[in-house]
Amino acid sequence: LSSRLQNVFSKLKGKGKVSEEDVNDAMREVRLALLEADVNFKVVKEFISKVKEKAIGQEVMKSFTPAMVVIDIVNKELTELMGGAQSKLAKSNRPPTVILMVGLQGAGKTTASGKLAKLLQKQNHKPMLVAADIYRPAAIKQLQTLGEQLKVPVFALGDQVSPVEIAKQGIEQAKQEHHDYVIIDTAGRLQIDESLMEELKQIKDAVQPDEVLLVVDAMIGQEAVNVAESFHHQLELSGIVLTKLDGDTRGGAAISVKAVTGCPIKFAGMGEKLDALEPFHPERMASRILGMGDMLTLIEKAQTTIDTEKAKELERKMRKAEFTFEDFLEQMEQVKKLGPLDQVLDMLPGMGKMKGMKNLNVDEKQMARVVAIVKSMTKEEKQNPELLNASRRKRIAEGSGNSIQEVNRLIKQFEEMRKMMKQFSSMMGNKKQMKKLG
Ligand code: GDP
Ligand code: MG
């Protein structure tokens, strides 16, 4: 327990400015998180150096730790990297607005076309779908089935007419029927190939779409870079739809595709169902990729709840080894103010993972027990733990509803903690050592 608490406490101490060492420490975690999330390594490298530049020398507010400041910058930069604010769908002032869906086979183009139609429908638009994938068996039928479910008309001319012709005639029909959006579902290939690109280019030239949306499967990770690069090079994309984010992928593809194409990610596919398409929120994606839960919430909470003056006093006491059970209790209360302990740990980078480890299981009850034991001590005992002999321990155990073993364990931990603090204080001259241990 004590090592866990120390870990939390150490994160709550204030400091003057962010040093290069602080940044390097924090960035090691961030780098790992990004690579784990399958972000392209070149993109990671560039990103890290940019954040470092921004972070070093930043002021650290009283109740923040340098790590928090760095993470805050990371979050903002990552959000920025993915486009900053949420990006809207284009709207032509000469309806219909034409949306061309492109991407590899299986990326989710047809599904996304249906989902997009549904989203537009909900916003009181009148979308029409166009079935321009004549290659994949049953591709037309698939779109027609979606159309039936949504009660959105699907324009199709079978698989004997060229996709260019289908697209052109589809738009004509949409005009006549006063549809304000036309979504063209196209064919994909398992890999990027010349004839596919050529055909897509022809469709694009023929219909002059307002949007060319690349549909990318978030699960393909690193490969997303190549896919996005070649599609953008050939077709000049206007936006990206990232699908299958409901899977266990961390979504590093989101960063890569945006970084490579510069195109905003407009939508996120969150499932197979037709209502599983959401406008893409860069800031949410940033925290997902970093796997740090809601870091910003923690920072805000820390700002409002940690009493910095008290924290300073405690730090002074720790250094002088005057730390008592009363101080211990106070620190517990401070940590508790942040919220349920397991949630607090969730919010700290790296801690989420640690929680899964057996001996690091966070136990609220255990914490409550500790508080009960300390509260059963007299004022004298709290200030002078040396007084805690066998009979006193027995009394405390009974008073707090715990076993003697538990009381003994806590006192032992407390003594160890004190011992460590003494060691800290003897090392005070050497700040670097302090930081490593704290
Ligand atoms: P296309 O070849 O690009 O047209 O891909 P499809 O739209 O036919 O989708 C391929 C498969 O991926 C289908 O089984 C879809 O149900 C599935 N799919 C599409 N989008 C999503 C998504 O956001 N989440 C999940 N879990 N599956 C999806
Ligand atoms: Mg399809």
Image (spheres, helix red, strand yellow):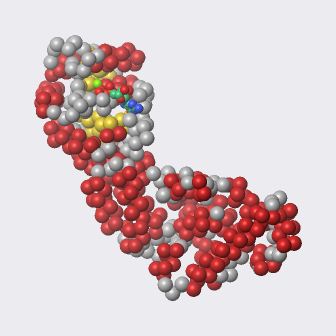
Q: Is residue 259 left or right of residue 400?
A: left
In the picture, residue 29 is in which quadrant? bottom left
Residue 433 placement (x, y as % from top left):
49, 79
Residue at horizontal 49 percent and vertical 84 percent from the top: 430
Residue 356 placement (x, y as % from top left):
55, 51
Residue at horizontal 55 percent and vertical 69 percent from the top: 10
The one nearer the camera, 198 or 357, is 357
The one nearer the camera, 92 or 57, is 57
In the picture, residue 21 is in which quadrant? bottom left
In the picture, residue 179 is in which quadrant? top left
Q: Quadrant of ligand 1?
A: top left
Please indicate, yes or no, whether residue 178 appears anywhere in the rendered image. no
Q: Is residue 260 left or right of residue 57?
A: left
Residue at horizontal 62 percent and vertical 55 percent from the top: 362
Residue at horizontal 65 percent and vertical 82 percent from the top: 321
Q: Is residue 243 left or right of residue 349?
A: left
Residue 415 placement (x, y as % from top left):
69, 75
